[in-house]
């Protein structure tokens, strides 16, 4: 095999430097001429020690073949000298072993002649030996001669077997009682109701008996090899014995080629014709061969196809009956092993011929139902393995209760039983085969030829002992299909055909199960063959899981389409039609077809109507039967679990589908609404849950693995998740448009709403930010995902605060003076003019982000209250009862827990974390604290400027301002709480200072300029909002620096204004 595989070929045979030396050695073989050829052998001289070392294994393998040949020749001579009696029906084991020996010898010598490099390997090794030790290897002369003699191995062995002809002929002709009745057509099998347990119910419990028990399950393939090779060697029998000729013709008509070893085949007709055409008087035999060849090409394919068709139904019946009544495995064990042997022969025949024959009709050599036959074989094997103890118990009782009694009677009636035989008889069960061999020798006084009944009884008892002791070996003998290991291309093609045919996909598990057979054909000296069987098994299971995954994905797509039809947006058309009918308005087009309502697809007029979904479910249930057939299988020391392949594929596909269903387009910044995505995900999950009806897999584990990964920024493969996509979209698209003035936050609606602008936005903000959408988002992202969203929002806030701090630092002197001049209006006005920049734009952006966050947190709380009400109420209780004197670190831990559950907190822990991470290294804590205080002053003194803005008008309908300045209330409270928690200041004191500073709003009440005071009432209301929003401020405090009467009048004014503007 190493010489056949180009990769494993000895490197010296393809070494360019040694090319001339190798050609010279092969030309002179077997002669050795080291003198006068120094030029050609110079390179060989350099590498002689390496060649000796590396070619020794190959060389001595050829020596082993020669020694085997010597032993075979010696044994054959001994058998002839003893005139051993051979009859397959009497002394089965001896005859079988004799014929196996002959065929093994023939195939070995033929394989030897097929190794093209044999002369080069042997010659190279010997020349290296000669150069190193000064003489040829001692085995070389005989080995070289053997290689030359067996150039044409069959011709040489025909001469060699002349003296052994009689023994071989006797053994072969005894097959006339077995082979013809085994080589029958499917119709003959059907008429005889072969292998059927239920054809004769009355005899169902009777033990299956035969005079020739072991011959019943003897491989047809093996018998055909014996006949073809045997009669080539003792061809004279074909002219003298009609029985021999009949066997020979029948074998030639059934096959076009025979297996030599693994995938090496022997084309029988051509080889036999080439041998016989040169023998005088063999014209008739040559014509026989040609006729048989024509017959084989014309009829063998269809005959074997019909046999496989019969065996499929016969094995199915047998497996079904035995699954229901395993006790029948005792009396009907013979049927099981016959069925396995017959099926194995047909499968091997197909495999061999499909790969090697130029066919007239290709249909006979492509069997799309082969998987079904292999599957029933596997079922029978599984029954034997599972119920082995039942069979063993039956046959132990059979041997002691019946066989021992009958054998005793037979021995009593023997006319002569000399001492040697009686000693062997006394320990009969252990030495059955040796007795059979002993009594077959011609000089034995107790000859089996004269006591055939005893021989047949011995064969039966040997079968019964095998049933008690060697069930596993019997399974290998009758049903081993490890030959597939060497036909991997055909194996893979059969598997693909099986998956493509929906009716056969339920049997696809038989291909991975076949890989478990490969352990019986590979060898520890060829580890690459082990890897091949592992990779094949892995590939089959992977393909099955992929196919199932694709079917599930198609079903999910269909179900998502159906659930999409139920979305509220689709009912608008139905409602408008109903309204039109009521108002009797004529529709635009006459006879416009009425829209089908969701659910129509479930109304069937008859059962014959098959929808695409029906086909998918049928195909899936068939394939899942296969995946669920065995929990696991062992191939070498590796355990394969088919269900795990499906689970891992579903996880990967579910992950991709969820991300795909968001329909995020980076170029156009489009994304699916959270509620629509949630509907699709739920439809998907419903389908996946139904998979548990087909396969025993834990689908909850799939959900946990996939959905938990989707709550993180990246999944386990480093790919973006829905959390990162939605976070990115809300920050970069929705909130960016808010800061650009195209969208406003409407507190009354608890949503962001598009404002009328020249350039219409591509999306409607309300459809992405109202309560139902935010709840859907919370369902999808979960607490982890919402925490990530919050952290991303806070990161944006912290960057805005950093910019604000820079503004404060730029204006620090003026602000410091203003902080001590709240009671000097004129001085304040002068100082205000010296301020270089306005902070309110950035503060409003912070307010907008915090408003969006409060929407998200509220939605999260609503969702968690539905899922984990008791846990949420416990967290709420915990938060509401923190004593005021609690250490701030402990309080922050409680706030963090509350925030994760979506509860609002006095101090936002996420904001504290974000702002505390941006402390400057070169600024002292005292300086940082001062900047924080001045920032609040800066915001307070800047508020009067808002009154001059046209967009600052308060709208009672939306409970806010169109330029989002109502969000300042949230920004001021949250930023103050976070900054003074970080700097360990008093939040209440700083907010009181803020109110004092904002009293500069009173100044705009005295202004006469209409443009600067156009919206002063709307701006006054901000102070009320700030106090309402704050857990630290009270209306009493506000009253002390801003009279409530002004607020009341402001409310009157804005409501009056809104009524007049709407009118």
Image: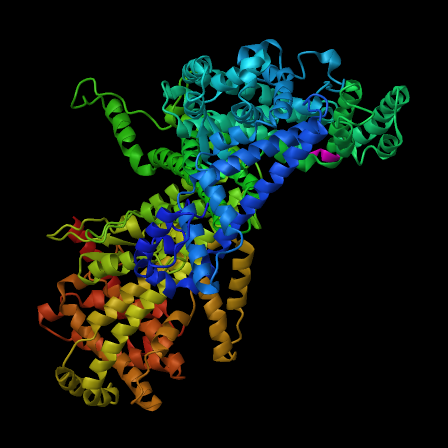
Residue at (49% x, 72% y) in the render: 893
Q: Position of residue 413 (x, y in %)?
A: 89, 19
Q: Which quadrant of the figure has residue 632? A: top right
Q: Is residue 485 above or below residue 872?
A: above
Inspect this view and state whether residue 609 appears. Answer: yes
Relative side of 648 to 590, left or right? right
Outermost residue toward the top in this view = 191
**Magenta part of the chain:** 386-390
Q: In this view, does 437 lie above or below 291?
A: below
Q: Where is residue 491 in the image (x, y as percent from the top left)?
A: 44, 35
Depth check, front residue: 453 or 1052: 453
Depth check, front residue: 113 or 570: 113
The stretch drawn in magenta includes residue 387: yes
Residue at (27% x, 64% y) in the render: 848
> Which SS type dominates the magenta stretch?
helix
Outermost residue toward the front in this view = 36
Q: Which quadrant of the figure has residue 631? A: top right
What scheme was used to colour the molecule?
rainbow
Number of numbered discs visible in the structure rendering:
0
Q: Where is residue 362 in the image (x, y as percent from the top left)?
A: 37, 21
Residue at (20% x, 81% y) in the render: 807
Relative side of 138 to 953, left or right? right
Q: Position of residue 191 (x, y in %)?
A: 59, 8
Q: Is residue 710 above or below residue 449?
A: below
The stretch drawn in magenta includes residue 524: no
Depth check, front residue: 171 or 78: 78
Inspect this view and state whether residue 1005 appears. Answer: no
């Amino acid at each position: 095999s190493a010489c056949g595989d180009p990769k494993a070929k000895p490197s010296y045979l393809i070494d360019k430097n040694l090319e001339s030396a190798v050609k010279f050695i092969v030309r002179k073989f077997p002669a050795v001429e080291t003198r006068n050829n120094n030029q050609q052998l110079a390179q060989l001289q350099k590498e002689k020690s390496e060649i000796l070392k590396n070619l020794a294994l190959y060389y001595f393998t050829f020596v082993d073949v020669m020694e085997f040949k010597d032993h075979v020749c010696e044994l054959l001579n001994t058998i002839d000298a003893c005139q051993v009696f051979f009859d397959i029906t009497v002394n089965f084991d001896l005859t079988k072993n004799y014929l196996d020996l002959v065929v093994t010898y023939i195939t070995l010598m033929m394989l030897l002649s097929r190794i093209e490099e044999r002369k080069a390997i042997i010659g190279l090794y010997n020349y290296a030996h000669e150069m190193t030790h000064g003489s040829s290897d001692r085995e070389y002369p005989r080995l070289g001669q053997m290689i030359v003699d067996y150039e044409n191995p069959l011709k040489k062995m025909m001469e060699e077997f002349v003296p052994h002809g009689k023994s071989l002929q006797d053994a072969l002709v005894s097959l006339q009682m077995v082979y013809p009745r085994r080589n029958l057509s499917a119709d003959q099998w059907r008429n005889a109701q072969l292998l059927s347990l239920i054809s004769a119910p009355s005899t169902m419990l009777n033990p299956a008996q035969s005079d020739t028990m072991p011959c019943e399950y003897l491989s047809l393939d093996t018998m055909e090899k014996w006949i073809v090779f045997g009669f080539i060697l003792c061809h004279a029998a074909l002219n003298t014995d009609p029985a021999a000729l009949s066997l020979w013709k029948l074998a030639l008509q059934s096959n076009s080629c025979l297996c030599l070893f693994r995938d090496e085949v022997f084309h029988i007709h051509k080889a036999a014709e080439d041998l016989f055409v040169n023998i005088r008087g063999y014209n008739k035999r040559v014509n026989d061969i040609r006729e048989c060849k024509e017959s084989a090409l014309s009829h063998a394919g269809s005959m074997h196809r019909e046999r496989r068709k019969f065996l499929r139904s016969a094995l199915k019946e047998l497996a079904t009956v035995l699954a229901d009544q395993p006790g029948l495995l005792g009396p009907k064990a013979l049927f099981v092993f016959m069925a396995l042997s017959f099926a194995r022969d047909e499968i091997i025949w197909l495999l061999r011929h499909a790969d090697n024959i130029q066919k007239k009709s290709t249909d006979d050599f492509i069997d799309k139902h082969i998987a079904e036959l292999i599957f029933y074989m596997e079922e029978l094997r599984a029954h034997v393995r599972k119920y082995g103890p039942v069979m063993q118990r039956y046959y132990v009782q059979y041997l002691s209760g019946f066989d021992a009694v009958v054998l005793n009677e037979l021995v009593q009636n023997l006319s002569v039983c000399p001492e040697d035989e009686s000693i062997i008889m006394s320990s009969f069960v252990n030495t059955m085969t040796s007795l059979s061999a002993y009594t077959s020798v011609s000089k034995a006084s107790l000859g089996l030829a004269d006591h055939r009944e005893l021989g047949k009884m011995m064969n039966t008892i040997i079968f019964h002992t095998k049933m008690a002791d060697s069930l596993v070996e019997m399974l290998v003998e009758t049903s081993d299909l490890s030959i597939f290991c060497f036909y991997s291309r055909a194996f893979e093609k059969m598997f693909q055909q099986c998956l493509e045919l929906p009716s056969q996909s339920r049997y696809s598990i038989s291909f991975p199960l076949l890989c478990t057979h490969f352990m019986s054909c590979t060898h520890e000296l060829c580890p690459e063959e082990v890897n091949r069987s592992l990779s094949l098994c892995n590939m089959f299971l992977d393909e099955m899981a992929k196919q199932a995954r694709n079917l599930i994905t198609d079903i999910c797509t269909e179900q998502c389409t159906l659930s999409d039809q139920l979305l509220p947006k689709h009912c608008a058309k139905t409602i408008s039609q109903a309204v039109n009918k009521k108002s009797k308005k004529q529709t635009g087009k006459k006879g416009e077809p009425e829209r089908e309502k969701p659910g129509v697809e479930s109304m069937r007029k008859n059962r014959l109507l098959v929808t695409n979904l029906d086909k998918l479910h049928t195909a899936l249930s068939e394939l899942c039967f296969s995946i669920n057939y065995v929990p696991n299988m062992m191939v070498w020391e590796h355990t394969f679990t088919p269900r795990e392949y499906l689970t891992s594929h579903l996880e990967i596909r579910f992950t991709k589908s969820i991300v795909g269903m968001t329909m995020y387009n980076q170029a156009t910044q489009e994304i699916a609404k959270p509620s629509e995505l949630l509907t699709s995900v739920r439809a998907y999950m419903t389908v996946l849950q139904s998979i548990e009806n087909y396969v025993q897999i834990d689908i909850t584990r799939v959900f946990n693995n996939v959905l938990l990964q989707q709550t993180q920024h990246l999944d386990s493969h480093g790919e973006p998740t829905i959390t990162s996509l939605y976070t990115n979209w809300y920050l970069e698209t929705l909130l960016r448009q808010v800061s650009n003035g195209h969208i406003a936050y409407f507190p009354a609606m608890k949503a962001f709403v598009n404002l009328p602008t020249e350039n219409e936005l591509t999306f409607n903000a309300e459809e992405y930010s109202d309560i139902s959408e935010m709840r859907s988002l919370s369902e999808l992202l979960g607490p982890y995902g919402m925490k990530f969203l919050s952290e991303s929002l806070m990161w944006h806030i912290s960057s805005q605060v950093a910019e604000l701090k820079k503004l404060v630092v730029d204006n620090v002197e003026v602000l410091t003076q203003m902080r001590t001049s709240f009671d000097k209006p004129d001085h304040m006005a002068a100082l205000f003019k010296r301020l270089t920049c306005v902070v309110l734009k950035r503060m409003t952006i912070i307010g907008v982000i915090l408003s969006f966050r409060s929407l998200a947190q509220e939605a999260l709380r609503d969702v968690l209250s539905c899922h984990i009400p008791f846990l949420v109420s416990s967290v709420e209780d915990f938060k509401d009862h923190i004593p005021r004197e609690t250490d701030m670190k402990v309080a922050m831990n409680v706030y963090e827990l509350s925030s994760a559950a979506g509860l609002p907190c006095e101090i936002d822990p996420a904001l504290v974390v974000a702002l505390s991470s941006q402390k400057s290294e070169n600024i002292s804590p005292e300086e940082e604290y001062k900047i924080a205080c001045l920032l609040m002053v800066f915001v307070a003194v800047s508020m009067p400027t808002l009154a001059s803005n046209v967009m600052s008008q308060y709208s009672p309908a939306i409970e806010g301002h169109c330029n989002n300045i109502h969000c300042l209330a949230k920004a001021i409270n949250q930023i103050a709480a976070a900054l003074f928690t970080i700097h360990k200041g008093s939040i209440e004191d700083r907010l009181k200072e803020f109110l004092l500073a904002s009293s500069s709003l009173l100044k705009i009440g005295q202004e006469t300029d209409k443009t600067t005071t156009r919206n002063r009432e709307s701006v006054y209301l901000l102070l009320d909002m700030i106090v309402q929003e704050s857990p630290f401020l009270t209306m009493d405090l506000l009253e002390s620096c801003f009279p409530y009467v002004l607020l009341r009048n402001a409310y009157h004014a804005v409501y009056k204004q809104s009524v007049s503007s709407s009118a």
